[in-house]
Structure formats: C-alpha cells, structure tokens
Image (tube, grey):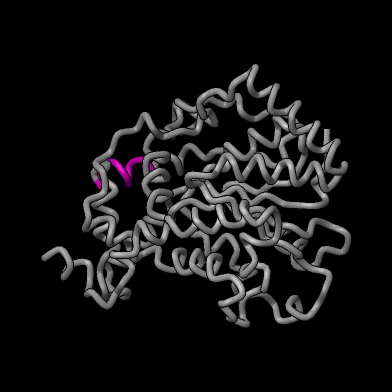
Amino acid sequence: LSDFSNEFIFFHVGKGGGGTIETKFKQAHINYAASHPIPAQKFKEELLNTNGGANTLILNVRDPVDRFVSAFKWDMMRACSSIDSDERGIIGDNWRSEGRTYLYKSSCELSAQRQEMLTVKYKSDPNVMAEALCGEDKLSDEYLEASEDYYMIEHDMKLTQWIDFLIDPPKESLQESGDIDKLIVLPMEKHFDQLIDGYILHLLQSRYGDDVGAYMQQIYIDQVASRPIPGSKHSTSSVHVPPLTDFGECCIARHLEDDYQLIGTFIEGEQNQQTTMHPVIRKACTSWGTAEQQQLCLEDLSSMLLRRSKYLDRSKGTCAELFGR
C-alpha cells in the first residue's frame, strides 16, 4: 500500500466521476485523504498552511449542467426505507468499508424532504427547477426560493464553493511558501480514464522511480484486466427524467455561470492574471504530467465551455428572449 495521505487531498465533487477516481486509486493500492460530499474545513486549512501536511489538491471536474441533472436524479433515487431509518434504501449501505478517510451518515428525514421537493414541487423534471432559476431579478421571491431549493440538492454544491478558499484566499497565503503547491483537475470528459491512469503513474514514479513505478502500474493494469470494474453503485443512469430543453439548459447554464468562468480560468492559465486568486488555479492543467497530458486536460475543459457557449453569451439576450418565452 502506497500512503499518499500526507501528500495530496482529494476533493470528491459529487456526481462528477469521483467514484471512478476512488476506485482506480484503490486498485492501485494508493491510500489518500478525501472529502465528500462537502469540502472539510480542516482540509482547507491544511492546504493553506501545510506545515508538513498535504500540499496538493486533486479536484474532479464535470460539466456543471451535466452535474446538475445527475444530482437531481440522484436525490430522486436516494430514498431510505423509512424516515427513521439510516439505511440507504435502493443504494444499500455496504459501501461503508473500513479504512475510508471519511464516513457519511445519511439523514433519511432530509432525504425524504429532498425527494418530495423534486418529485412534487418540481414534478420530477429538472427543467422546472432550471426555469425557476431563470429570472433576471435575483431578488424576486421565486428566484430566491428556487435558489434555496437548489442548495438542498445533496451533490450539487458549486465548484466555486468547493475551492472558495483558493478563489479568494487569505492574503497571507499568497505571500507564504508553505501552503498549497498544486491544484490538479481531472475533467470528466473524453480522456478522463486516461488522465486518471496517467496521474497514478505520475504518483508511483515520483515515489519509486520511473522503472519501479511503471512496473507497479503494469501490475495494477493486469489486475484490473482480470477483474473488471463493476458498474457504479452511484450511477443515476436508471433514473429517467425529461431531458433538458434548450430553454432549460440555457437557464441552468447561466445559473452556474460562475463555475463556467472558473473552468475558463483553469484553461487560460498564466494568461489570466487575477491577483485575488491563488496562483495554483492558473496551473490546474499544467502542474503535472507530459505536454500531451496537459493538452488533453485543457481540451477536455474546453469542450465543457464549447458545449454551453451559446447560452453563456449574455450579449445575445436573456434565455427568455432567446427562446421566445
């Protein structure tokens, strides 16, 4: 077992491929510290003032609109067997294996409230919530109520909230050399598996040398080939909801505009000189790996922006104007 718990922390952003990353780390016998379903304050403090602790943060990134839909579906399927139960109903409770770096105790009462909100108030349709978030008046009762409902969804914390301590860090952390050294993003896009495997090889070679690290990686690959990864127990593919309409997609993309801007900053790198942000944000794709791996990371992030670009351009008018609402 290779223990990297004092070297990096994994912020497992919900419904963004974090389960795949965890599975691959475990199969490679890599031990690590992680935070899920929300970022632990103690880890934020450790990263800003390492003092011998972890100085690297790993963050999984998925297209924010896709994450919203997946999180919406997750809360619809995540029903407990009863309000008083701590069972996870359809999901089961077997995932609480020993040795995890965190435990999550479900609240069945809150789960039931979420499910009722999504199935009754929002009619099991992510478009209904998206459209409620579409108003230009951010102080309207409808918008404020929908925003509160949005934050009730368990795994839909915005990316900007996950790393708020890096977006607007304490001034002293920008002046000290002892804090976080690297932010590494792993985009859940076309090259997701390739980048995870590449980072695992990077970790092993950094620890054990190129030859031994490559040998350990090959053993891991052979073991995975003989024991394929089972389907994710956290998948929402079995939950069927209406697909987002163009109008609904526009509405939720603009509600998540800050996250898309952050992804844009990951891409722009050193060209973005916002001094208030921690400099590691501008090196999210370029702080490790080969030039090819860095390019794949940038391409995958760019594909997220390209997918929603027509909705994020506010010069074209409001979503309602774009779609005649």
Quadrant holding the N terminus: top right
Whether residue 299 appears in this view of the structure is yes
Examine the rendering and report whether any part of residue 165 can be seen.
no
Q: Quadrant of residue 24?
A: top right
Residue at 27% x, 78% y: name it: 315
Q: Quadrant of the C terminus?
A: bottom left
Quadrant in the rendering for residue 47: bottom right
State the image quarter where residue 222 is shown.
top right
Q: Residue at x 68, y 27 (%)?
A: 221
17 to the left or right of 241: right
Q: Residue at x 70, y 22 (%)?
A: 223
What x and y, as percent, mark residue 174? Answer: 73, 78
* Magenta stretch encompasses residue 308: no
Q: Report the residue at 57% width, 77% height from top.
A: 271
Predominant SS along the magenta part: helix
Q: From which residue to which does the magenta span run?
A: 114-122
Total marks placed? 0
In the rendered image, the residue lying farthest to the left is 324
Q: Is residue 256 left or right of residue 34?
A: left
Residue 218, horizontal then vertical, whole percent? 74, 29
Considering every residue shown, the one lying at the far top of the view is 226
Which of 187/148 is in front?
187
**Coordinates of residue 11 in the picture (x, y in percent):** 63, 51
